[in-house]
Image (cartoon, helix red, strand yellow):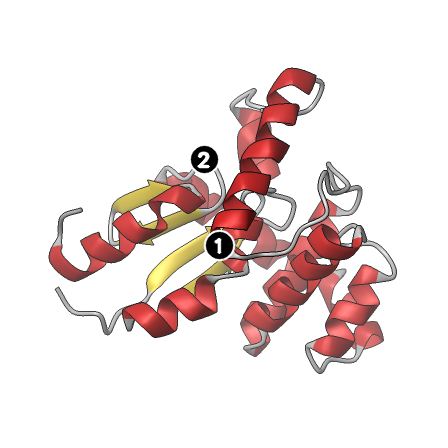
Amino acid sequence: MSDAKPITFWFSIGSTYSYLSIMRLADVAREAGVSFDWRPYSVRAVMTEMNNIPFANKPIKARYMWRDIERRTEKYGLEAVLPAPYPLENFDLANRVAIVARQEGWCPAYVVATYRRWFQQGQPAGSEPNLTESLIEAGQDPQRVIEQAGSDDTEAAYLAATEEARGLGIFGAPTFAVGEELFWGDDRLEDAIAWHRTGKV
């Protein structure tokens, strides 16, 4: 199988486990010789429809999640101050900004910046000062982008992306799509790359 076509990386800013993928995806792409198409969508909408809210009001499971992420950050050599603020108050705004970023070609820069501030500095994504500082780091004018993120066109694009993800059978983040094959979870990234190359894991 050819490595020319990108692996589709479906993510939602607000997904805790996505931190692990987002912060290493550039290095993985370079080392593996693959590329990724970053696709923001609302995993919250999909999971709510499925009555699947995995960590809210579930302290035992949430405690496990944070410890699991802590172990994996150590494995990958990532920094994190855990638990990070969760859930995000401005989940949809953070992701609508990502929609704008994808349309304009600077999605990875913004998403990495906002996750770094969220997980390493305790600044919730989509809220201030994270939002403005992350946009500046990505080389953008915060006022322009935030206005665009609130537009009807961006909302329509956000809903369309979420509907596309839903139609593909995507139910969580991060998810890596190789054609019709779905690989859910940061721990399935290497399987997605193997399938992309050979059609098997």
Residue 188 quadrant: top left
Q: Amino acid under label 2?
A: Phe
Residue 145 picture location, percent across and down: 75, 72
Tell me the element at label 2: loop
Image vertical order of residue 85 relative to residue 145, above or below: above
Tell me the element at label 1: helix
Residue 123 picture location, percent across and down: 81, 53
Q: Residue furthest bottom?
A: 139
In the image, taking residue 78 as reference, residue 168 lies left or right, namely left
Mark identifier at residue 76: 1
Q: Residue at x 65, y 25 (%)?
A: 63
Residue 72 picture location, percent across and down: 50, 44
Is residue 30 or residue 104 the one in the foreground?
30
Is residue 129 or residue 159 the one in the foreground?
129
The N terminus sits in image quarter: bottom left
Foreground label between 1 and 2: 1
Image vertical order of residue 56 relative to residue 26, above or below: above
What is the total number of numbered labels drawn onto the structure image?
Answer: 2
Please say whether residue 145 is visible from this viewpoint: no
Mark identifier at residue 171: 2
In the image, taking residue 121 as reference, residue 26 lies left or right, namely left
In the image, taking residue 137 as reference, residue 19 lies left or right, namely left
Residue 153 picture location, percent across and down: 65, 63
Q: Residue at x 42, y 41 (%)?
A: 185
Q: Residue at x 55, y 60 (%)?
A: 23
Say which label, 1 or 2, has the lower sequence index.
1
